Image (spheres, rainbow, N blue to C red):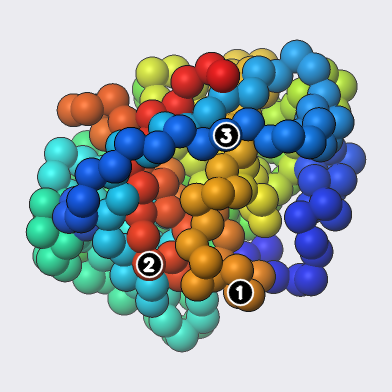
């Protein structure tokens, strides 16, 4: 489910419960919502965290961002849509594209993750993952899996994937065979629409599709321990585009910060997350 189907933010929240490094540096802290909607939608005991913007960076607004990964100074980014799906390797310092892998027009690029010297690329409905040489972006293999492909990250010896439901699947990184699953939840309530993933220090961070929200997930229990709402970061130029939602989260280990962006966003933010 990668394109808009007309569900506004309030409806999306109800569904969730029921089922380039160049630019001027800034420092802004997102304010907590004045409404209790987030707490009503998610419930207790999740903590509301905030994002502090460290810098605002340029981002190619052509990219329909699905996956985001940062390895040293190289940013890998996948862009979806049939007929225009690509994966780029980008120099984070200059914003220059180093290499591009173009998917067949019949395939929709989704989440990506780096495993050693390989880059894995999911597809949405095609049950195919491309295995690329991370240095050259040339194809070296293809793998298959049974579910929809949405987000992906690497956690220890597992590759973690999402499929748009409340389920995370932990897979063998060499075959994508499923090893175990866990259900993402807050108390007794399942949290659906789990999308782009980033694994950091034993925790899974996830975008929740069609919202401005990132959730922090325990990979063993599936419990959501915190959420970060960032509606104020959405660029004004995207407000009339229902598909241009927050999507894309990558951890920068060198600075312990996160890069976040969205589909067709002209900007990317470097942020930190902390308890409010």
Q: Is residue 272 above or below residue 126?
A: above
Q: Identify the residue at horizontal 80%, vertical 17% (top origin).
A: 44
Q: Residues within 10 Å of mark 2 (few under 14, many from 20)?
A: some
Q: What element carries label 2?
A: loop
Instruction: Locate the N terminus by quadrant.
Output: bottom right
Q: Position of residue 123 (x, y in %)?
A: 50, 63
Distance from the alpha carbon under mark 3 to that under mark 2: 22 Å
Looking at the rendered image, the disc whose residue lies closer to the viewer, 3 or 1, is 3
Q: Identify the residue at horizontal 76%, vertical 71% (top origin).
A: 5
Q: Is mark 1 on a helix, strand or loop?
A: loop
If you read the primary sequence from the N terminus, does the residue marked by circle 3 or circle 1 appear first? 3
- Residues at circles 1 and 2 in contact by the CB criterion of under 8 Å: no
Q: Position of residue 201 (x, y in %)?
A: 38, 18
Is 14 situated left or right of 154 in this image? Answer: right
If you read the primary sequence from the N terminus, does the residue marked by circle 1 or circle 2 appear first? 1
Looking at the rendered image, the disc whose residue lies closer to the viewer, 3 or 2, is 3
Q: Residues within 10 Å of mark 1 (few under 14, many from 20)?
A: few
Q: Name the residue under label 2.
A: 266
Q: Is mark 3 on a helix, strand or loop?
A: loop
Is 6 situated left or right of 261 in this image? Answer: right
Q: Mark 3 points at which residue?
A: 31
Q: Mark 1 points at which residue?
A: 241
Q: Which mark is residue 276?
A: none
Note whether residue 118 is visible. Answer: no
Is 156 situated left or right of 148 in this image? Answer: left
């Amino acid at each position: 489910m990668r394109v808009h189907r007309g569900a506004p933010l309030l409806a999306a929240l109800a569904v969730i419960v029921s089922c380039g490094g160049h630019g001027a540096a800034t420092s802004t802290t997102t304010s907590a919502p004045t409404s209790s909607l987030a707490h009503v939608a998610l419930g207790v005991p999740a903590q509301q965290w905030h994002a502090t913007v460290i810098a605002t960076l340029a981002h190619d607004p052509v990219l329909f961002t699905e996956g985001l990964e940062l390895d040293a100074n190289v940013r890998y980014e996948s862009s979806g849509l049939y007929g225009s799906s690509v994966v780029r390797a980008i120099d984070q310092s200059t914003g220059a594209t180093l290499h591009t892998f173009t998917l067949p027009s019949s395939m929709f690029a989704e989440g990506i993750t780096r495993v050693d010297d390989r880059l894995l690329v999911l597809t949405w409905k095609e049950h195919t993952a491309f295995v690329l040489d991370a240095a050259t972006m040339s194809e070296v293999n293809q793998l298959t899996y049974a579910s929809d492909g949405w987000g992906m990250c690497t956690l220890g010896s597992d590759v973690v994937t999402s499929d748009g439901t409340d389920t995370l699947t932990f897979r063998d990184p060499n075959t994508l065979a499923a090893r175990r699953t866990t259900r993402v939840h807050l108390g007794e309530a399942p949290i659906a629409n789990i999308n782009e993933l980033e694994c950091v220090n034993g925790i899974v961070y996830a975008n929740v599709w069609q919202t401005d929200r990132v959730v922090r997930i325990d990979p063993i229990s599936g419990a959501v321990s915190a959420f970060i709402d960032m509606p104020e970061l959405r660029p004004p130029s995207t407000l009339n585009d229902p598909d241009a939602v927050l999507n894309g989260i990558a951890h920068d280990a060198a600075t312990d910060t996160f890069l976040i962006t969205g589909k067709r966003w002209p900007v990317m933010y470097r942020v930190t997350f902390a308890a409010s």
